[in-house]
């Protein structure tokens, strides 16, 4: 199965994705500072994280629902990297209690059975192993994203993780003035589109009916913002984001949960 190229799977090659891509890149860079040993990634995406994560591991297994060709990357050839195409949960074929770390970025919000998802992650981790997870902060979402089954506030995610993990470090991804400027421009642009939704259909219709229209409008909006604010959009780097204690104003939740 080939990758379905939606606005949910950001590209490092599309300048209109840069605002989101650089935030995703920060997650990998921050995770790379924390990981070691045997690492499992759930959600390979286009595979750009492999180059960042693999050099810090003894063994790196990365899973995705869609085919992702990472075999030609330098990291794949140099390090012990394996790609597995798998629709999860469950983590079928993944041995219990063998991984030091599991990383999963911008995935849990797509999983209908989030409790089962976390149970499976806990199963494959060693005692004392850690999960590093990112997901959008519900409080900062500008509009409903119909590709997401749900989103979490920082309290909701902490409570969920605490069911399966002994310790939860609640961190968040924040942005500097440049990031907040782009966010505000994006919000104003989205508000101009959604003002026509006088019956509030974005929240009333089944999300599956809204996915393609949302994706088209989201992509068009990103292209428009790039055209109108090219210097701002392309000038954003991962250094414009930073990790801090999670609160209502962080863009993404970045949680580290430890298995007892």
Image (cartoon, grey):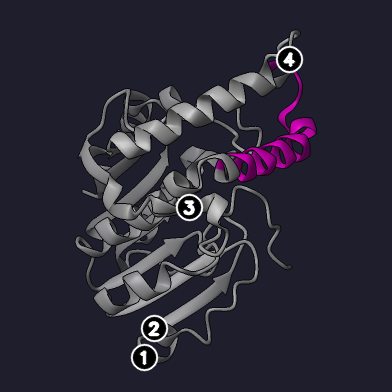
Residue at mark 4: 197
Residue at mark 2: 75
Q: Secondary structure at mark 4?
A: loop
Q: Going from the N terminus, do you reach mark 1 or mark 3 first?
A: 3
Mark number displayed over residue 181? none
- Badge 3: residue crowd in 10 Å (few <14, some 14–19, many ≥20): many
- Badge 1: residue crowd in 10 Å (few <14, some 14–19, many ≥20): few
Residue at mark 1: 78
Residue 177 vs residue 7, the one in the foreground: 177
For the record, the magenta segment spans 203-225
Residue 113 horizontal side relative to residue 134, left or right: right
Q: In which quarter of the view is residue 60 placed?
A: bottom left
Q: Going from the N terminus, do you reach mark 4 or mark 2 first?
A: 2
Q: In the rendering, at what x and y percent does residue 80 appear?
A: 37, 85
Report if residue 89 is visible in the image. Answer: no
- Badge 2: residue crowd in 10 Å (few <14, some 14–19, many ≥20): some
Q: Are marks 1 and 2 in contact (CB under 8 Å)?
A: yes
Residue 67 vs residue 200, the one in the foreground: 200
Q: Is residue 200 magenta?
A: no
């Amino acid at each position: 199965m080939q990758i379905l190229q939606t606005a949910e799977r950001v590209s490092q090659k599309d300048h209109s994705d840069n605002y989101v891509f650089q935030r995703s890149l920060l997650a990998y860079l921050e995770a790379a500072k924390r990981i070691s040993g045997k690492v499992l990634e759930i959600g390979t995406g286009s595979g750009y994280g492999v180059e960042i994560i693999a050099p810090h591991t003894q063994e790196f297994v990365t899973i995705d629902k869609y085919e992702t060709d990472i075999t030609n990357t330098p990291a794949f050839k140099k390090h012990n990297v394996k790609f597995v195409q798998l629709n999860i949960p469950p983590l079928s074929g993944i041995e219990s209690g063998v991984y030091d770390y599991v990383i999963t970025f911008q995935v849990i919000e797509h999983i209908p059975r989030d409790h089962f998802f976390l149970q499976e992650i806990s199963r494959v981790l060693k005692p004392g192993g850690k999960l590093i997870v990112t997901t959008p902060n519900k409080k900062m979402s500008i509009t409903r994203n119909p590709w997401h089954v749900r989103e979490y506030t920082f309290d909701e995610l902490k409570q969920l993780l605490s069911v399966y993990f002994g310790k939860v470090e609640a961190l968040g991804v924040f942005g500097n003035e440049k990031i907040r400027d782009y966010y505000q421009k994006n919000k104003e642009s989205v508000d101009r589109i959604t003002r026509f939704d006088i019956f509030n259909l974005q929240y009333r219709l089944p999300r599956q009916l809204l996915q393609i229209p949302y994706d088209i409008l989201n992509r068009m909006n990103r292209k428009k913002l790039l055209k109108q604010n090219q210097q701002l959009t392309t000038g954003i780097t991962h250094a414009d984001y930073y990790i801090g204690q999670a609160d209502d104003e962080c863009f993404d939740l970045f949680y580290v949960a430890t298995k007892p």
